[in-house]
């Protein structure tokens, strides 16, 4: 789909419904020829395609149209247009059937959602963060969101990142040239020079990260909530994911009574992790287990067990309702699809099934675990990195569908910036240890591709589909 940028597309660029005017937008090599199929010009028109932006007063005109309808035609040549192709806009009275008739007579391919901005991106007019900002502006629900989107549209971090990318490209070229001519013993780059340039690149990247965070404004952190039956190992996992001993852990079921929150950052994505009281089943159709008599992690209520159970259920429910992602924890040795499935809804994109205490599984016991479950042992530090990666990926996917587009861009950028920063640090470490230039070049290439994901030099069809499918038609 993304390669087809050379045909001519058309779409109504204004919202459907009643209004004073509507705009029909055309982009592509046939734009100028096509518009002549539906209008007559009220004044003389240059024979050749104009070389500068122009506005023409015209009438809609075709055989069988009972009256001439006045309209304005705006023309931008490829060098001056949004899509970097000839663009024509027809501004006329707002009328749905009229728009349909014009589009039918233009005989052009209807544009897909976001296709005009996609063309702007593919031609280098805007980077991916700016493309997303276009959606941010359209979707802004309040002034603050509009300001953030406009800042992003105005350039954001794209410019400085592109400059840094150029510098890293030069560096990789120099390091690799040194490799190619290694046998000839030509010192293309001294270790000191290499070290200085990579350190400078790292400093620039840290500056860009700071600038990015400053511009971001206060957005609420996404929430990841640990749920599951009592004693499943939620609090132990909570502590392990945070690398601290925040929550009380005990073999007695019902240890956690209220919910606990802590902020966690992985791959540059910050989220709130929430530990909850154990529940036998999904909040809503549940009874909480309050059979334990151990200390609460929060203040003790002093009520009877049934009242505590109700409060625990309510607390877990409150925490769960605001979750962007649930980690449903279940002891791996107790797992069976029937028991889990009967009590919990696990088949949704918001839930990751986490099978805990993997160290207690007999050898070969993991074969009965479902493929999409995460097998972890907080005690033996097994599977935690993979789970954290999945949390970040899950949050990114969730945010794509639920949050404002600027928040999504922020998460995507932060993730990519962190990966670039890690790669540069790794390159610095390799240089310090005077490791092979091969490894150094590889680390720098990782940084380059992470930066390229933000600026749009490196993109996959998947990223483009995700971004541009959020657009409305005509943008
Ligand atoms: N062997 C093993 N034991 C674990 C692991 N994780 C937790 N446990 C033990 O399981 C018991 C329960 O752990 P918790 O983390 O308190 O479980 P919980 O799900 O928070 O329990 P509640 O708060 O009662 O709902 C404790 O005795 C932990 O030491 C693990 O990875 N391996
Ligand atoms: Mg607990």
Image (spheres, helix red, strand yellow):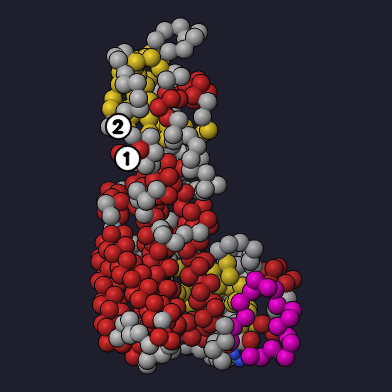
Residue carrying label 1: 79
Q: Residue at x 46, y 38 (%)?
A: 473
Q: Secondary structure at mark 2?
A: loop
Instruction: Tell me if residue 362 is in the magenta stretch.
Output: yes
C-alpha gap between disc 2 and disc 1: 8 Å
Q: Is residue 54 above or below residue 427?
A: above
Provide residue 443's location: percent of width, then percent of height. Answer: 42, 79
Q: Earlier in the sequence, mark 2 or mark 1?
A: 2
Q: Residue at x 72, y 91 (%)?
A: 362
* Residue 268 appearing in the image: no
Disc sitting over residue 431 in the figure: none
Along the line of sight, which residue is nearer the eye, 205 or 373? 205
Q: Residue at x 74, y 87 (%)?
A: 364
- Number of residues whose C-alpha sits closer than 10 Å to that of mark 1, classed few (under 14), some (14–19) or many (20 or more): few
Tell me which corner region of the image, top left, top right, bottom left or bottom right, holds residue 33. top left
Along the line of sight, which residue is nearer the eye, 256 or 376? 376
* Image quarter in which the C terminus is found: top left
Q: Which residues are magenta?
A: 359-377
* Residue 331 appearing in the image: yes
- Number of residues whose C-alpha sits closer than 10 Å to that of mark 2, classed few (under 14), some (14–19) or many (20 or more): some
Provide residue 438's location: percent of width, then percent of height. Answer: 45, 82
Q: Secondary structure at mark 1?
A: helix
State if disc 1 and disc 2 touch (CB < 8 Å).
Answer: yes
Instruction: Tell me if residue 65 is in the magenta stretch.
Output: no
Residue carrying label 2: 51
């Amino acid at each position: 789909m993304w390669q087809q940028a050379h045909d001519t597309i058309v779409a109504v660029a204004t919202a459907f419904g009643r209004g004073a005017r509507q705009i029909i937008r055309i982009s592509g090599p046939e734009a100028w020829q096509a518009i002549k199929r539906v209008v007559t010009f009220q004044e003389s028109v240059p024979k050749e395609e104009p070389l500068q932006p122009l506005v023409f007063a015209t009438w809609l005109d075709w055989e069988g149209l009972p009256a001439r309808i006045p309209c304005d035609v705006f023309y931008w040549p490829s060098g001056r247009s949004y899509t970097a192709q000839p663009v024509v806009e027809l501004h006329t009275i707002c009328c749905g059937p009229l728009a349909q008739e014009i589009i039918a007579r233009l005989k052009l391919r209807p544009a897909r959602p976001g296709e005009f901005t996609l063309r702007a991106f593919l031609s280098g007019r805007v980077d991916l963060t700016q493309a997303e900002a276009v959606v941010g502006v359209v979707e802004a629900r309040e002034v603050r969101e509009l300001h953030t989107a406009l800042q992003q549209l105005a350039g954001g971090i794209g410019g400085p990142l592109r400059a840094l990318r150029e510098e890293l490209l030069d560096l990789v070229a120099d390091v690799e040239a040194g490799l190619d001519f290694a046998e000839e013993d030509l010192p293309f780059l001294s270790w000191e020079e290499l070290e200085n340039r990579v350190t400078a690149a790292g400093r620039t990247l840290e500056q860009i990260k700071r600038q990015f965070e400053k511009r971001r404004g206060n957005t609420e952190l996404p929430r990841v909530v640990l749920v599951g039956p009592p004693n499943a190992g939620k609090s132990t996992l909570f502590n392990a994911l945070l690398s601290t001993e925040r929550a009380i852990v005990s073999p007695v079921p019902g240890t956690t009574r209220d919910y606990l929150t802590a902020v966690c950052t992985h791959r540059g994505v910050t989220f709130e992790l929430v530990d909850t009281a154990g529940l036998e089943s999904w909040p809503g159709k549940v009874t909480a287990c309050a059979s334990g008599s151990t200390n609460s992690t929060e203040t003790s209520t002093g009520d009877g067990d049934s009242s505590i159970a109700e409060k625990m259920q309510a607390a877990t429910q409150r925490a769960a309702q605001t979750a962007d992602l649930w980690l449903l924890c279940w002891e791996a040795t107790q797992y069976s699809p029937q028991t889990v499935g009967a009590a919990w809804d696990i088949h949704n994109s918001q839930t990751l099934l986490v099978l805990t205490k993997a160290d207690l599984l007999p050898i070969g016991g993991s074969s009965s675990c479902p493929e999409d479950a995460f097998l972890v042992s907080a005690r033996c530090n097994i599977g935690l990195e993979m789970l954290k990666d999945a949390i970040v990926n899950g949050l990114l996917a969730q945010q794509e569908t639920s949050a404002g587009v600027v928040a999504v861009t922020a998460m995507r950028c932060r993730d990519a910036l962190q990966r670039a920063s890690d790669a540069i640090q790794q390159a610095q470490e390799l240089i310090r240890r005077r490791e092979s230039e091969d490894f150094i070049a590889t680390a720098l290439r990782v940084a380059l591709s992470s930066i390229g994901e933000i600026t749009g030099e490196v993109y996959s069809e998947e990223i483009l589909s995700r971004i541009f499918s959020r657009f409305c038609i005509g943008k």
